Amino acid sequence: MKVQELVERLPEALEECLSAVPRSEIIQVDREVRLKNGTLAGLVVDLRVLGRGQKMLVEAKSSGQPRRAREAIDQLKRMLSDSQMSDAYPVFAAPYISEASARICRDFDTGYVDLVGNCRLAFKNAYIEKVSPENTYKERRGRASLFSPKSSRVIRLMLGESRSWRVQQLATAAEVSLGLVSKVKKELEEREWIISTADGVKLSDPERVLMEWAQEYSYRKNMVGEYYTLAGTNDAETAITGWCEEKRVRYALTGFSGARMSSPKVRYNRSTVYVESNVDAVAAGTELKAVETGGNVLLLKPYDEGVFQGSRVLYGNRVVSPVQLYLDLQSMPGRGEEAAEEVLVRELRPLW
């Protein structure tokens, strides 16, 4: 959304925010006010709240990510230094303001308002705070772009190794273009999820990035083939991995099959294997019967070959990386979240 469109809609959003306070109204809205110190105020609002006058200084940004929030706060500080704005209340506005940005605003005693219904205004004579139950405004450059198939290869690499990366190194290792890596880097900077070092950039809070990705991810992003076999899980997996190795088809265990390789205490009754092949061909070659429900073998045709990134051999079997294993488990029923948590504790946190 362009800033101009946002500014046009802000008075309505402010009125909705103020609706909970009696005797409150917007008296006047002035756009692009040139202050005495030379700075340009995007929006100056004169209010009456509980019968008392209040001036509000609003800085609008097209994105509500943390980096933009800090920029807005810095600009508001410069505006407030002007003598005619010394009593004004600073407010950051965006189409949608994330919890991280809202926290930054609170830390710097700055109000905020967005078009979704989130707001916090703390005047000397009133306190208003509203939280929208859901984000009805989706930023197109947001999570979806970060965790799309090709972009997620970059994220997976950065989560899988506790080190700094240069753009060229990431592009080469992830087998994606320099332009794509630059876009991913920019989005991570917007969210303040990376820090710069002498050797490049690294994730500032890997666990948080993983949790954000997990909210967007499901193993059903892959093409899922469900099958049944009278053989046990061990025999089924042996047959599948043996067929793949013979045919030189890339594979990797995941889900509870992968979790058992890193934690032998895991008990399960359904095998899950990624195969870079036609799943029906694998099933035919290993005597698996296709079923609609109730299968005890899942064959996953990857939505992107990046799922094999960082795979390792455990007890003679190839298993997906801890990052991919966590993502797949957390979206699986039957204690999948519990198994994912163990992967997080045993393998990922020590790595970071």
Image: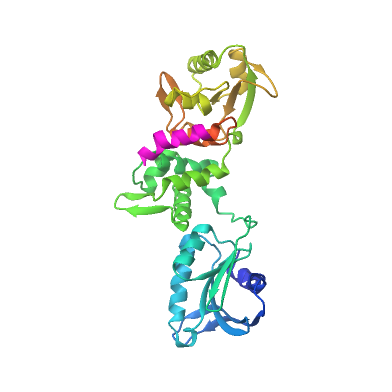
Does the magenta-highlighted stretch encompass residue 347? Answer: yes
Q: Considering the image in quadrants, where does the N terminus appear?
A: bottom right
What secondary structure is the stretch in magenta mostly built from?
Answer: helix
Q: Which residues are magenta?
A: 338-352
Image point 58% across, 22% down: which residue? Answer: 270
> What colour scheme has been applied to the protein in the rendered image?
rainbow
Q: Position of residue 170 (x, y in %)?
A: 40, 43
State the quadrant of the C terminus: top left
Q: Is residue 173 above or below residue 139?
A: above
Viewer-closest of 247 and 123: 123
Membership of 233 in magenta stretch? no
Q: Is residue 25 left or right of residue 150?
A: right
Q: Residue at x 52, y 58 (%)?
A: 99
- Can see residue 176? no
Residue at 47 percent of width and 50 percent of height: 184
How many numbered discs? 0
Work out which residue is located at the far right of the displayed protein and give it: 292
Picture layout, residue 56 above or below residue 184: below
Q: In the image shown, does 293 or 42 lie closer to the viewer?
A: 293
Q: Give the percent coordinates (x, y) of residue 290.
A: 67, 19
Does 106 sit above or below residue 311?
A: below
In this rendering, the answer to whether 42 lies above or below 71 is below
Residue placed furthest toward the left = 198
Across and down, in percent, residue 159 comes to: 42, 42
Q: x, y (%) of residue 111?
A: 53, 70
Is residue 212 among the parts visible in the rendering? yes
